[in-house]
Amino acid sequence: MDGEPIAGAVVVFSPLSGSTKPCYGETSPEGTFELTTYETNDGAVPGEYRVSVVKSEFSKPPEGFDFDNRTFVEKEIFLTPKRYADFEKSGLTATVTASKTNNFEFRLEN
């Protein structure tokens, strides 16, 4: 993101056609990832995909929060721009081919 790798982001490939399975991976500290479809790191089924990339965390209650008398509602905090979590808004796509090694680089901008 903004020219730097993102560690711990979830990358999801969503197929454009119903005949292909979705797949996902998590980025390393270097920003690289391997995809899982059926078994860990087995890659993606050939086809065309829309892609989402998201890194988020959930809010925590403040120190000393009184759970007995108050309700705390967790909120998701996006560490990557929220638009990249939405397949329709991310603008990210990938074509996986069977005849070669597939490497994808996604550049996220704030």
Image (spheres, rainbow, N blue to C red):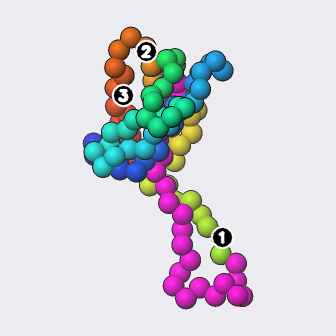
| Residue that extends furthest to the front in the rendered view of this protein | 39
- State the residue in front, 15 or 39: 39
Residue drawn at the location 55% of the way across and 88% of the way down: 64
- Provide the secondary structure element on which disc 1 rests: loop
- The residue labelled by disc 2 is 97
Q: Marks 1/3: CA distance?
A: 37 Å
Q: Position of residue 52 (x, y in %)?
A: 50, 37
Residue 12: in sight, yes or no? yes
- Callout in the foreground (2, 3): 2
Q: Is residue 107 magenta?
A: no
Q: Residues within 10 Å of mark 2 (few under 14, many from 20)?
A: few
Name the residue type under label 2: Thr
In which quadrant will I find the N terminus? top left
Q: Position of residue 81 (x, y in %)?
A: 46, 48
- From this viewpoint, is residue 93 visible? no
Q: Nearer the viewer, mark 1 or mark 3?
A: 3
Instruction: Identify which residue is drawn at 64% across, 88% down.
Output: 66
Question: Which circle marks residue 73 in the picture?
Answer: 1
Residue position for label 3? 104
The mark that comes first in sequence, 2 or 3, is 2
- How far apart marks 1 and 2 lie (CA) works out to 44 Å
- Mark 1 vs mark 2, foreground winner is 2
* Residue pictured at 40% horizontal, 35% vertical: 34
Residue 39 picture location, percent across and down: 51, 34
Q: Amino acid at mark 1?
A: Val
Q: Secondary structure at mark 2?
A: loop
Q: Magenta segment: does it hold 54?
A: yes
State if disc 2 and disc 1 touch (CB < 8 Å): no
Q: Residue placed at 47% from the left, 37% from the top? A: 40
The answer to whether 8 appears left or right of 17 in the picture is left
